[in-house]
Image: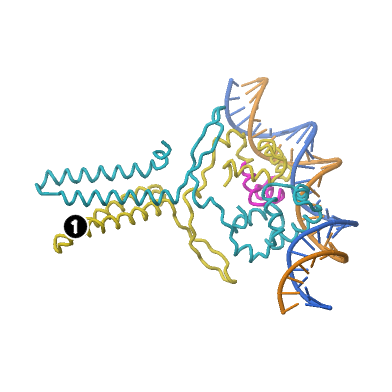
Chain colours: A yellow, B cyan, C orange, D blue
Amino acid sequence: MATWKKYKTQILYAFSLALLFLLLKLAEYRLLIVDHSLEIYAGSIALLFLLLGIWIAGKIVKPKEKISIVEKERIVEKEIYVTSATTFVRNEKALKDSEISARELEVLELVAKGLSNQEIAAALFVSINTIKTHMTNLFVKLDVTRRTQAVEKAKTLFIIP
Amino acid sequence: MATWKKYKTQILYAFSLALLFLLLKLAEYRLLIVDHSLEIYAGSIALLFLLLGIWIAGKIVKPKEKISIVEKERIVEKEIYVTSATTFVRNEKALKDSEISARELEVLELVAKGLSNQEIAAALFVSINTIKTHMTNLFVKLDVTRRTQAVEKAKTLFIIP
DNA sequence: CAATAAATCACCCGAAAGTATGAGTGCTCT
DNA sequence: AGAGCACTCATACTTTCGGGTGATTTATTG
C-alpha cells in the first residue's frame, strides 16, 4: 500500500505513456483502413494529446479527496480539490533553529487544536504545571506572548500544519 | 532561467518521453525497413501537444512564488510552490449558515492573528466589553468554548484563511 | 565524572479570558 | 409603528493563562 502511494506519480506517468502509445497505434490502424486526410489525422492527434497533457498534469497536481460536510441538515460526501502542497511537510530546519523540543512540539500541536492547558495535561498524562512550563518555553522560543500567536507563528514557519 | 526551474519536472518527463520515442523508432528501423515518416510526423505532433497540454495545465495550476529565508546566516531567495488553492476563497455558505455577523467576522480575523481582546478593542475603536460580547456570540455560533478552538474551527470551515 | 539539556512538578500572583445578565441605540422590514 | 437584529457597553464573577522562580530526575555528552 505504501509502495503504491510512494510511486504513484511515476506509475501514473508510465501508465499514461502506455496509453499514449496505444492511442497512437489505434489512430494509425484506422488510418490504414480508411484513408482519411492527413490534416484530420494530425489535428485529431494534436487535440487528443493536448487534452491528455492537461489531464495528466491535472491528475498529478490536483489529487481529489472526499470530505464529509453537513448540507441542509444532512451529511453529504463531497469531493474537493486538495493540491499536492496540502500534504504538510514540516520545516525541519525551522524546527531545529527554534530549538523546540519533541515534547514541546507535542504540546504545540495540541494547543493548535484548541485544547486548554488542562486538557493537554490530561492528554499527555502530566501535570498542568508541566504544560505551563512547556508553554512558557514555547513562547520564548517562538518569540510570542500568547498561545494564539504561538500557533499562528508556528504555522507560518511550517512547524505545524 | 526561472522558467526552466519552474517546469523542471514536466520538462524532465517530457524529455524522457521523447527519448523513449526515439528508441522505439530506432528499434523499429532496425527491425523493419519501412517508411515511418508518417509515424514520426504523428508522433512529433502528439508529443508536442502533450507537452503543450502539460505546460498549460502547469501554468494554470502551479504558480510559484519567491520567498526570502535565512539560511546559514544569509538571506537566500527560494522558490516555493504556491498552489492555486493558496488564494483563499471564503466559504460564504458556511459563513451564512453559522450566522456570524460582519462585525463578528472582523473580530474573528483579528483573533486568528493572535491579538488579545484589548488589542482588538483598540483596533476596532470599541470597548473591550464589546469584544467580549462578540467573542461570546462567536463561541456559540461556532460551537466552541475557547478562542483557539474558534480559530481552528473557522479555518476548517474556510471562514477565515 | 561533571556538565548540559530535557522533562517533570510546584507555588504565587496578576492579567487576560470567558460567563451571565441586562440594557440602550439605530437600522430594516413588514 | 412595532418587531427583530446587529452593535454597542457595563457590571460582577469565575476560570484560565502567563510570568517568575525554584527544584528534581533522567539521559546524553564532552
Above or below, A26 against B43 in this view is: below
Other residues around mark 1 within 10 Å, as few (<14) / some (14–19) / many (≥20): few
State which region is magenta: A105-126
**In this view of the protein, which residue sits in the foreground, A20 or A3?**
A20
Horizontal relation, residue A86 to residue B119: left or right: left
Residue A27 placement (x, y as % from top left): 21, 59
Above or below, D16 against D19 in this view is: below
Dominant secondary structure (helix, strand or loop) of the stretch shown in magenta: helix
Q: Label 1 is found on which chain of the structure?
A: A
- Seen at 10% across and 49% down, the residue is B34
- Seen at 56% across and 32% down, the residue is B70
Horizontal relation, residue A85 to residue B92: left or right: left
Q: Is mark 1 on a helix, strand or loop?
A: helix
Residue type at mark 1?
Answer: Leu
Instruction: Find residue B69 and report its image quarter.
Output: top right
Indicate yes or no whether the magenta region holds residue B23.
no
Residue A77 placement (x, y as % from top left): 51, 65
Indicate yes or no whether the magenta region holds residue A115.
yes
Instruction: Find residue B101 and report its image quarter.
Output: bottom right
Residue C1 placement (x, y as % from top left): 65, 20
Horizontal relation, residue A57 to residue B31: left or right: right
**In this view of the protein, which residue sits in the foreground, B139 or A125?**
B139
- Seen at 71% across and 53% down, the residue is B147
**In this view of the protein, which residue sits in the foreground, A153 or B110?**
B110
Residue B155 placement (x, y as % from top left): 61, 54
Residue topped by disc 1: A38
- The mark tally for this picture is 1
